[in-house]
Amino acid sequence: MDQHGGGSLSAMPNVSVIIPHFNDLAGLDRCLAALEAQSFPRERFEIVVADNMSPCGEAAVRATIAGRARLVIAAARGAGPARNAAVAASRGALLAFTDADCVPGPAWLTNGVAALDHHDLVGGAVTLLFAGSGKSGAEAYEAVFAFNNRRYVEREGFSVTANLFCHRAVHAATGPFHVGMSEDRDWCLRARALGYVIGYAPGAQVAHPARADWGALLVKWQRLNAELYANMLMTPRGRFRWLLATAAMPASILIHAPRIIASPTLAGALERARGVATLARLRLWRFGDGLRRLVSARA
């Protein structure tokens, strides 16, 4: 069930790159091409792709990999179980996590691995890829608010799994990624509770595609709101805190709109107007969804 690439089994790699995949062959091909162009010596890392039973079929995934990675099949649905399956099949002393739709910069591995000399787990920088020259409302919103991994690492103590490094021993002690919650935040906070130290590596960069339209952005936030709610329920007075956060959503439109208007990442009044409109639409959706979850919990 696996396909070997990047060295023989007798040549133990220093680093295992872990990639969950589901039905995105173009993204996977682009990600693997970027990994083949790393400044880090190719013989020192392996790539393990865990396919989550993609509808395109195992043969299509193997053809896309084309010998550049090892393939394992993860029957349990979800990125977390896929990462767990890939880790179980990997051999490196260090683990580097990214996603199939991400494009690692050429020095991603070099800088991420170097940061592990000083930290137990490391989050790198995440930039955004845009489909065209003019940003849609969803792209404008994400250009301002999405993937601020420096803030996540330095203020909130976790890194997104699109750009996460750790020692294998840290992963073994912390345990697998869980499902039904914000798995990256949950895993990093569990590691930190064991005393492990997280750091930020700005030179370890990956690019992640921005959500191109409202439908894609909504799918993302349907998942995130469910994870945020599950996480909140695990804290003291969780439902009350969720109610306060939900009630603040309409007011947050006025509070955060100036960030879009003043953002240097947006070009012109049209992109800014689209961004503000998407901000209002999303926050009002989150307000309604937050109330629905509270009402459903009491039913």
Image (cartoon, rainbow, N blue to C red):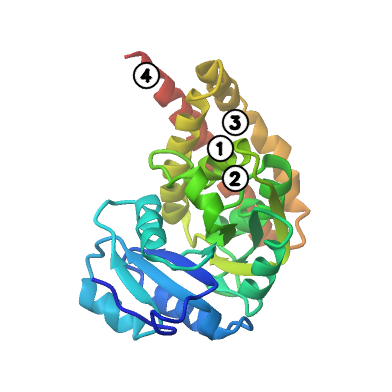
Q: Can you say which quadrant of the picture contains the N terminus?
A: bottom left
Q: Amino acid at mark 2?
A: Leu
At label 2, counting other C-alpha atoms closer than 10 Å, the crowd grade (few under 14, some 14-19, many 20 or more) is many
At label 3, counting other C-alpha atoms closer than 10 Å, the crowd grade (few under 14, some 14-19, many 20 or more) is many
The residue singled out by tag 4 in the image is: 297
At label 1, counting other C-alpha atoms closer than 10 Å, the crowd grade (few under 14, some 14-19, many 20 or more) is some
Q: Say which of 272 and 220 sits in front.
A: 220
Above or below, comparing residue 282 to residue 204 in the picture:
above
Q: Amino acid at mark 4?
A: Ala
Q: Amino acid at mark 3?
A: Met
Q: Can you say which quadrant of the picture contains the C terminus?
A: top left
Query: Residue 108, located in which quarter of the rendered image?
Result: bottom right
What x and y, as percent, mark residue 31?
48, 75
Q: Is residue 139 visible?
A: yes
The residue singled out by tag 2 in the image is: 279
Q: Is residue 148 visible?
A: no
Q: Secondary structure at mark 4?
A: helix
Mark toward the viewer: 3 or 4: 4
Above or below, comparing residue 216 to residue 92 in the picture:
above
The residue singled out by tag 1 in the image is: 283
Q: Amino acid at mark 1?
A: Arg
Residue at image position (41%, 42%) is 178
Residues tagged 1 and 4 counted as in contact (Cβ below 8 A): no
Distance from Cα at disc 3 to Cα at disc 1:
5 Å
